[in-house]
């Protein structure tokens, strides 16, 4: 009877996933092998790779020299420490895809955070897509899906752990970016950056208040403000959930909740579904499960955190984005599926959203700096506990483990170590100016944990996908194209009122920008309304690239774009034709503006960045390389991300496949 109920639950879960979108012979290269494999799933060498997103070599070296990173210093003394060449452009999904596949974007087809649809010129997420089922049976207001939907990972090329699997070499891959949904493998993998919340966003928080509050929307994420009323010391509201695939029009689901406020003390009781818990003012809850019902008998469960920011004089309640519940994942987040469930059984609920730190809440002053850091410290402590767990059972093969804290905190706190940044504040710098250094020290503790578990046959590699620099000034690419006659609007259209290219006259437009580093030609035969003839392409590309590289900021006298790369010159592989035509490599201190990536035309060509998102990595890769440390000498003088991939395979004695363009670093 129990088995029948368990099977029924599994079948129901599989059904919901469909609705929501859901060995070779051993070839050794003796000259390259450090230690040959002993046999099936038992390697004579073990490899630990720690991925610290965005860790910068200049900051790392300075802290090492000051004695603040003793584990880094010890590892470098035992082997090597040098800059690691990043991708073009040095964006996280692009860079980590380089490492995963051992090749450049022409070989894996990830060119930016967002790509464009040539049929309508609109931005689309680059890493994954949801494909709904095409057949439904309509019964009044109800829909019965007759065909399954699915979620597809858009990264091409084989992942290095799939190659290891060919040779029966075990691997655990913990939260590596650019792997959602996880590619098919028998290895243990947990998806990282790119994994959405339960609603399908990169992160959508909810904020309940009776104080007027506006939120700046972000593409793919952000938050919602819900106006509430405190009546009789009680607040009633609802938490929005995923859209309902069983209802015509797929309306949003929701869960009602109530807050009962103590009339005297700064404390409140929150009640919803079968749960109730008490929070004091300025207190965070533990993870809370929340279930959204589609129809009787069909529902999905997520997890979230509550933070009671203020009770009086204004009511302020923050609810984190609804993370996928790892105990009962409604969307695919691990291979095998039981891996996420196994971690949840040991650790309880944990962050599954790919970018767990709620930068949008800090940007919009829903959380302040201290509250943001408290939340991100939960991420770090959770990661450390899981790293220790994985190290304790690591016996053979490869372990890759990823930390997001370095990237997210540098994005938000760079303004407080750069006195020339438009968003620099002396008061905040006094209190939070050490956040970045402290975060690097936390990564040092993670490395020490790995070094303590290593034996003489363990190779330890520390790497980052890119470095960091200040983001002081934003460049409006589409405004530049408009001013220089490469983009045209319809008569009477005011440029500053345009978004998503509404009002563009495509019959006269030759170029447009979508994404953070990408420029496309309006190419005839490729874009829906293309006008640039193929024989004009080369001349036009080089003309635009030359002009962009000559652009000087009149405020600073600095070049804005250090290098405008023609993708045909820097990308090689089967997907090169899908790339943007020009990749912008910004100079230090510059990045694309906030508006230009989504088809807007702000009035100013260059503008100060006053936002808390103040550090970035959209520069030319030579400006912001990542880091590479190992307890083995690195022989290449100029290693790149894809070279690390080749080096890892070579450590296990695997002949490097021809589609991997990287060179063996060892």
Image (spheres, rainbow, N blue to C red):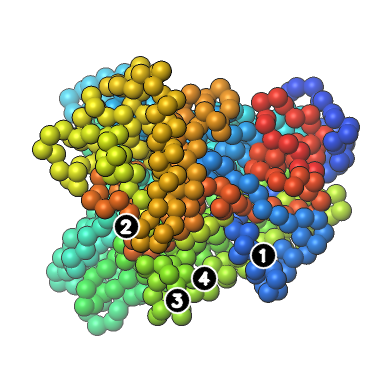
The image shows residue 189 at horizontal and vertical percentages of: 60, 40
Residue 61, which numbered label? Answer: 1
Tell me which residue sits at (40%, 41%) in the image: 547
In the picture of the structure, the residue carrying the numbered disc 4 is 435
Q: Can you tell which mark lies on residue 607?
A: 2
Badge 1: residue crowd in 10 Å (few <14, some 14–19, many ≥20): some
Mark 2 to mark 3 CA distance (whole Å): 23 Å
User: Marks 1 and 3, Cα distance to the nearest angstrom?
Assistant: 22 Å
User: Residue 168: image x %, image y %?
Assistant: 76, 31
- The reply to whether residue 256 is visible in this rendering is no
Dots 4 and 2: beta carbons under 8 Å? no
In the rendered image of this protein, does residue 260 appear above or below residue 130? below
Marker disc for residue 429:
3
> Which circle's residue, 2 or 3, is located before the other in the chain?
3
Position of 575 with respect to 45 (left or right) is: left
Dot placed on the residue nearer the N-terminal end, 1 or 2: 1
């Amino acid at each position: 009877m129990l088995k029948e109920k368990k099977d029924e639950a599994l079948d129901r879960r599989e059904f919901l996933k469909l609705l929501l979108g859901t060995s070779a012979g051993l070839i050794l290269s003796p000259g390259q092998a450090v230690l040959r494999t002993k046999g099936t799933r038992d390697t004579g060498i073990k490899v630990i790779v720690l991925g610290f997103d965005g860790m910068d070599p200049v900051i790392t070296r300075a802290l090492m020299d000051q004695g603040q990173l003793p584990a880094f210093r010890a590892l470098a003394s035992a082997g090597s420490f040098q800059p690691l060449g990043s991708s073009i452009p040095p964006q996280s999904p692009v860079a980590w895809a380089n490492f995963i596949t051992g090749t450049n974007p022409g070989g894996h087809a990830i060119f930016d955070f967002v790509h464009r649809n040539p049929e309508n010129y609109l931005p689309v997420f680059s890493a994954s897509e949801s494909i709904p089922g095409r057949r439904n049976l309509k019964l009044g207001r109800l829909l019965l899906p007759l065909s399954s939907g699915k979620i597809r990972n858009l990264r091409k090329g084989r992942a290095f752990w799939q190659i290891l699997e060919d040779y029966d070499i075990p691997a655990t891959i913990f939260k590596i970016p650019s792997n959602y949904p996880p590619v098919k493998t028998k290895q243990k993998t947990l998806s990282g950056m790119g994994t959405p919340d339960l609603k399908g966003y990169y992160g959508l928080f909810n904020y309940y208040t009776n104080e007027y509050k506006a939120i700046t929307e972000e593409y793919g994420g952000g938050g919602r403000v819900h106006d509430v009323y405190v009546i009789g010391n009680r607040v009633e509201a609802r938490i929005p959930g995923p859209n309902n695939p069983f209802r015509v029009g797929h309306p949003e689901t929701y869960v009602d909740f109530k807050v009962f406020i103590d009339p005297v003390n700064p404390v409140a009781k929150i009640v919803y579904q079968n749960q109730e818990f008490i929070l004091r003012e300025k207190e965070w809850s533990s993870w809370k499960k929340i279930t959204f019902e589609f129809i009787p008998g069909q529902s999905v469960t997520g997890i979230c955190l509550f933070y009671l920011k203020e009770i009086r004089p204004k009511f302020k309640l923050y609810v984190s984005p609804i993370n996928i519940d790892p105990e009962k994942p409604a969307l695919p987040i691990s291979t095998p599926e039981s891996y996420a469930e196994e971690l949840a059984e040991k650790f309880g609920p944990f962050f599954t959203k790919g970018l767990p730190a709620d930068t949008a809440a800090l940007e919009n002053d829903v959380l302040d700096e201290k509250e943001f850091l408290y939340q991100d410290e939960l991420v770090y402590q959770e990661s450390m506990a899981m790293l220790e767990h994985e190290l304790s059972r690591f016996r053979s093969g490869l372990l890759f483990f990823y930390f997001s804290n370095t990237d997210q905190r540098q994005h938000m706190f760079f303004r407080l170590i750069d006195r020339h940044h438009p968003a620099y504040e002396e008061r905040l710098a006094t209190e939070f100016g050490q956040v970045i250094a402290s975060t690097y020290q936390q990564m040092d503790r993670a490395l020490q944990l790995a070094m303590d578990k290593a034996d003489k046959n363990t190779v330890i590699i520390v790497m980052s996908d890119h470095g960091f620099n200040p983001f002081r000034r934003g460049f409006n690419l589409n405004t530049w194209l408009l001013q220089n006659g490469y983009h045209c609007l319809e008569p009477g259209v005011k440029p500053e009122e345009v978004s998503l290219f509404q009002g563009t006259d495509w019959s006269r437009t030759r170029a447009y920008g979508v994404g953070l580093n990408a420029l496309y030609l309006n190419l005839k035969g490729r874009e829906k309304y293309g006008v640039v003839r193929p024989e004009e392409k080369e001349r036009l590309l080089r003309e635009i690239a030359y002009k962009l590289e000559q652009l000087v900021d009149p405020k600073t006298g600095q070049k804005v774009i250090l290098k405008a790369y023609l993708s045909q010159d820097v990308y090689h592989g089967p997907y090169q034709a899908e790339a943007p035509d020009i990749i912008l490599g910004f100079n230090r201190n510059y990045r694309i503006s906030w508006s230009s990536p989504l088809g807007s035309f702000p009035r100013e060509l260059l503008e100060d960045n006053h936002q808390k998102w103040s550090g970035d990595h959209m520069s030319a890769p030579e400006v912001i390389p990542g880091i590479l440390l190992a307890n083995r000498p690195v022989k290449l003088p100029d290693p790149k991300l894809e070279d690390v991939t080749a080096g890892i395979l070579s450590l296990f004695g695997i002949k490097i496949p021809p589609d991997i363009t990287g060179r063996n670093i060892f």
